Amino acid sequence: MTRFLEATRIALATLREIFDEAAYERFLRRSRMISSTEAYAAFREEFEAAKASRPKCC
Amino acid sequence: MLDEEKFDGKHPTDMNKILTILAWIAVGLLGAGAVGVIAVCRGEPINALWLVAAATCCYGLGYRFYSRFIATKILALDALRATPAERLENGRDFVVTNRWVVFGHHFAAIAGPGPLVGPVLAAQFGYLPGVLWVLVGAVFAGCVQDFVILLFSVRRDGKSLTEMAKEEIGRVGGFVAYTAVIAILVILLGVAALIVVNALKDSPWGTFTIAMTIPIALLMGLYLRRIRPGKVLEVSALGFVLVLLAIWGGQWASQNPAMASLFTLRAPTLAILIIVYGFAASALPVWLLLAPRDYLSTFVKLGTIALLGIGIVALHPTLHMPALTRFIDGTGPVFAGKIFPFAFITIACGAISGFHALISSGTTPKLIGRETETRIVGYGAMMAESAVAVMAIIAACVLQPGIYFAINSPAGVVGQGAATATATISSWGFPVTAADMQALAHAVGEQTLFNRTGGAPAFAVGMAHIFSQSLGGATVMALWYHFAVMFEALFILTILDAGTRVARFMIQDALGHIYKPLGRTSWYPSILATSALVVGAWGYFLWQGVKDPLGGINSLWPLFGIANQLLATVALCVATTIIIKMHRTRYAAVTLVPLAWLVAVTFTASWHKILDPNPRVGFLAQARALAAGPGVASSTSATARLIFNNRLDAALTAVLVVMVALVLIESVRQWIAVLSGRDEARVRETPFVMTRLAEERG
């Protein structure tokens, strides 16, 4: 049961990382903001250049 | 030193050791048996589970023994050495991340449409060449490349392949890597767009579904921005439900005369729409269209790959394609060219892909918390990618061969009209009738399935065939087919959006050295000019493919494969140079052998594509045939353009080969200089810093 919970936790963490939710959380912590429309806009602005220039494979 | 066990505190007893050895012997025997069945069995269909067993055992053995050998003997992975994620942690790019999370992140970035499309196209040779190349290529070349480049980047503060090539080989290495990336991106985007066009042409259901993904993505973008900021998983799940509704709605659209006529589009119209879309996606704010579409496509991609894997294991379908077909002689209808070298450039991503070296030296090295984790992330994620390629081979080979060839062969090869095409294909020894094809088209909700080149429709039919066997039967085959088409098209269009933007950024970066404002990614004139340049470049190849009487894939997919494998050649040159400089020359064969193989494959393929006298293979021969043919008598501009396109493709291939030859020569000069003692073997690694994380982890 513990292993199953651990696996679920890691799977969820992986999805949160892939879908940039973890990056948004780190951004909020770093910039000492709480989640809001403005905070998300600021996150996207900072994140977009890096994300858009990141290659994805064929 | 590689000892993850030390940190985990495991001390296997002697009995455990004996059991482990016996278990690995059993895995070896099962793997050998499965590969034997695949290789030897002739004349009767085999079960897909043999492929699954062979792949599982090969990957298991490769990971346990070969990757461990590389990790200990060559790379000397050191769990005590701080990684850039730890030393340079900034909460943004450099973040120490759980290894399984990095694994998932890395896999999501390397798994594109390549491992699905390439193996489907190469199935024209039979299932055997594809399976052997995917297994051997991945274990001994692709996984090794991804693993060593990842580790070398980790030891150089997460530097990119281009930067490492410049530092280790010289300026020419960096320049070639940069140019090869741009060339690959442009050709890839052109060929990817062509695959979508071929999957959606004359298909109101498919076109409606894909068209609906644009408002769905816009809605997701607005939801993320205005309603629930940052809740990406939630909005992706919502978007997925809306996409399923769009698939269901597509059936209604295809049966409604007004809607069906609106969404029944020919290839040139679709090509223009995709070019316009590509430009808009590149120039619009990322949050509005590109980012939500990327999330949606990733959500669908991961779900579908998992579903397909479960489906194949649970339903273990029978492969109807023979182990080898007559087309190994180079006369294949899907693409022309002999098994060597063309099978090895057609299947890239599932065996070895140069593009992966960009990911391994991009985001991933900045997330790795411990050097020892590069093994599971670099070597392991590529094994997972290779498994996706095995699934694609299975999806293509469960089809009756006659049906596979009817879908994948261009009209220029099998003839116009159902009767002519089926007669030609049946004469090759793969019986199929016009009635079979009509019944299949009807079952999947299409008007016709003839000449659907590009691999995507054949994969979709195979996937629908596998799923409909247990989930819903024939009645829902059309839904499964359009789900698969939507999955591939959505996936490819995302690559188109993101790839256009990546190429735009790279060009802006280079132009910034000439005129500073051009390098500013937020300056609109620069955005518009570079977007137009990139979209114009891949749009040119797309248009070329749409107008090609041989279906486009015949010319463009090998060109893409050559460019991609040439980039792998550059990556392996960098890796071999570093290994020699690390005084591990006696183990240099680990990267040198795949490098030699890739040089043989890509240079031979390039020679054939440029100079082969067969007009279906050689670009110049085709240009000559067109010039001598009846088309020129009427002096049509279309013929003149086809001649120009072939000459352009030949010139592009030649330029890429010459550039990679320069990198190779430069690398060999470096190796000789280091080995003869003329030059000092200076490794440009970041100096050792002791990790703090080992103590924290106990």
Image (cartoon, coloured by chain):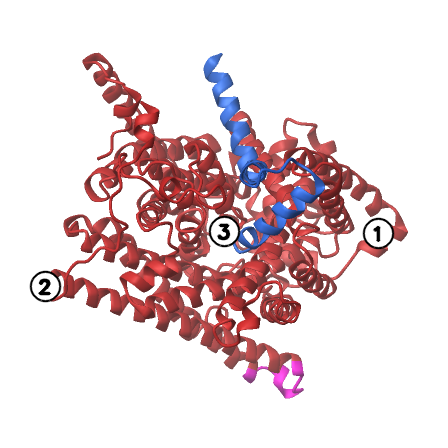
Chain colours: A blue, B red
- A16 magenta-colored: no
Crowding near the residue tagged with mark 3, few <14, some 14–19, many ≥20 C-alpha atoms within 10 Å: many
Left or right, B269 with reference to B615: right
Task: Work out whether B460 lies above or below B198.
Answer: above
- B631 magenta-colored: yes
Residue A57: which numbered mark, if any?
Answer: 3
Q: Nearer the viewer, residue B3 or B134?
A: B3
Question: Is residue B457 visible in this depiction of the protein?
Answer: no
The residue located at (51%, 51%) in the rendering is A56
Task: Work out whether B674 lies above or below B347.
Answer: below
The residue located at (36%, 60%) in the rendering is B163
- In the rendered structure, the residue with mark 3 lies on which chain? A
C-alpha separation, residue under disc 3 versus residue under disc 2: 38 Å
Judge depth for marks 3 and 2 and give the one in front. 2
As shown in the figure, which amino acid type bears the numbered disc 2? Answer: Ser
The quadrant of the rendering that contains the N terminus of chain B is top left
C-alpha separation, residue under disc 1 versus residue under disc 3: 34 Å
- In the rendered structure, the residue with mark 2 lies on which chain? B
> Are both tags, 1 and 3, on one chain?
no
Cβ atoms at labels 3 and 2 below 8 Å apart: no
Residue matched to label 1: B260
